[in-house]
Image: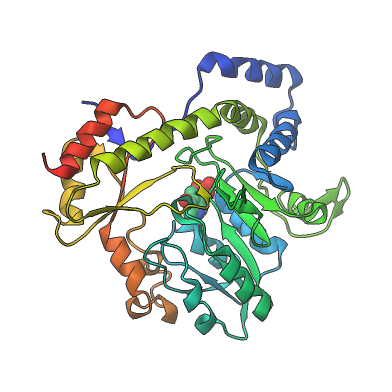
């Protein structure tokens, strides 16, 4: 059997992409907010049900820029259980990350532990909707309002997720998306910032273009975060197939839950009633009572050419540039530590066949 990776990008038929390329070749408009860029911003905002969206070259630059756009300084409260770019975006802005433990069901920042971490230097909260599970957006907003803090959601996993019939991306001051090849919706590399008003979008658009407000005026030390026309064109094509892709993922998610429902020591993540998921990941918890340790199961799958991933292990706070920070000490983050030691993300992507999935499930079951 061929190797199976945790994800595989959704690739629409090549012949569907060729007309887009011909247009780019004809127009010679390659970047700088060209026609495909403009069209993708509009269509994505519509599809996602958000007011404004600014495309970026990748999700990390979007995160770095979002912090700049809101002039965040000092300390920011965030989670250790994420991809390392979440915390790196703070260091790139000279901001001190303050790590707070996660909730054992949602794997997201535990809102009940946020207040204790607030100091006079705290200016914002940077939570992550891990695997597309919604954070407790109400509680987080309430804390932010009480203490006058901004909220920026790292929504890299939350493309198309709705919570209580509304886009999850509408919460907080800003949300960022990633369109990296491994994500549900991809533009090879790419990302976006979601914001509620046109004035903020203008500031973000200036910042991603070196700070140019017009041809001769530079209003801020901006960066080059622009998405190019090939990326944007690919995004437009992806968007035509996204519903179908999420439907396939939903079916795969349901089948895993069936296959793995009665395996002692294996737990699938819980499903909340108010949420429309995107099925971007399929995390399982390998707990006491299972015949193997998480590491042993991970190795066993590898031996069969199945590259499940330990997202997120190690924790961000285990990396050398973070572990010296007081809030990064393991004693402060017992839940995150436990989850990082137990979690394993199984392959999930639209082209994963039923047979491949059965093979994966039977290895996990130990048949
Ligand atoms: C993928 C990801 C990012 C980074 O996005 P890129 O587009 O790869 O730069 C940030 N945060 C989280 C949680 C991610 O999964």
Q: Is residue 325 in sight in this rendering? A: no
At x 65%, y 20%, the residue is 20
- The residue nearer to you, when weighing 332 against 229, is 332
At x 31%, y 62%, the residue is 340
Q: Is residue 153 left or right of residue 104?
A: right
- Quadrant containing the C terminus in the rendered view: top left
At x 55%, y 13%, the residue is 15
What colouring does the structure picture have? rainbow
Task: Residue lying at the far bottom in this picture: please name it.
Answer: 120
Image location (x, y in percent) of residue 266: 22, 53
Image location (x, y in percent) of residue 179: 55, 41
Q: Is residue 30 left or right of residue 295?
A: right
Q: Is residue 24 left or right of residue 256?
A: right
Q: Quadrant of residue 149?
A: bottom right
In the image, residue 342 sits, relative to residue 124, either above or below, namely above
Q: Quadrant of residue 325?
A: bottom left
- Quadrant containing the N terminus in the rendered view: top left
Q: Is residue 181 in sight in this rendering? A: yes
The number of numbered badges drawn on the structure is 0
Image location (x, y in percent) of residue 275: 52, 50
In the image, residue 7 sits, relative to residue 265, either above or below, namely above
Image location (x, y in percent) of residue 240: 59, 26
- The residue nearer to you, when weighing 230 against 168, is 168
- The residue nearer to you, when weighing 309 against 348, is 348
């Amino acid at each position: 059997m061929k190797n199976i990776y945790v994800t595989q990008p959704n690739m629409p038929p090549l012949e569907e992409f060729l007309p887009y390329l011909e247009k780019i070749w004809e127009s010679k408009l390659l970047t700088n907010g060209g026609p495909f860029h403009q069209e993708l911003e509009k269509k994505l905002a519509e599809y996602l049900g958000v007011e404004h969206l600014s495309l970026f070259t990748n999700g990390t630059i979007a995160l770095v820029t979002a912090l700049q756009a809101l002039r965040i300084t000092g300390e920011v409260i965030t989670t250790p259980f994420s991809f390392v770019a979440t915390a790196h975006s703070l260091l790139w802005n000279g901001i001190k990350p303050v790590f707070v433990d996660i909730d054992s069901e949602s794997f997201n920042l535990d809102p009940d532990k946020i207040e204790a971490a607030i100091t006079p230097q705290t200016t914002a909260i940077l939570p992550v909707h891990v695997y597309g599970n919604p954070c407790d957006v109400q509680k987080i907003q309430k804390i932010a309002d009480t203490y006058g803090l901004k909220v920026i959601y790292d929504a890299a996993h939350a493309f198309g997720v709705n919570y209580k019939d509304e886009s999850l991306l509408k919460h907080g001051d800003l949300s960022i998306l990633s369109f990296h090849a491994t994500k549900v919706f991809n533009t090879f590399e790419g990302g976006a910032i979601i914001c509620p008003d046109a004035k903020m979008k203008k500031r973000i658009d200036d910042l991603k273009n070196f700070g140019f407000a017009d041809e001769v005026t530079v209003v801020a030390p901006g960066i080059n975060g622009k998405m190019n026309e090939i990326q944007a064109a690919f995004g437009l094509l992806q968007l035509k197939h996204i519903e179908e892709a999420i439907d396939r993922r939903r079916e795969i998610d349901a089948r895993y839950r069936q296959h793995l429902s009665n395996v002692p020591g294996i737990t699938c993540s819980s499903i909340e009633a108010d949420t429309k998921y995107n099925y971007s990941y399929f995390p399982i918890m390998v707990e006491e009572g299972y015949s193997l340790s998480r590491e042993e199961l991970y190795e066993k799958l590898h031996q069969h050419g199945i590259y499940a991933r330990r997202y997120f292990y190690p924790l961000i706070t285990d990396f050398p540039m973070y572990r010296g920070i007081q809030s990064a000490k393991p004693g402060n983050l017992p839940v995150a530590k436990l989850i990082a030691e137990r979690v394993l993300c199984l392959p999930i992507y639209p082209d994963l066949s039923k047979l491949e999935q059965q093979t994966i499930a039977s290895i996990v079951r130990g048949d």
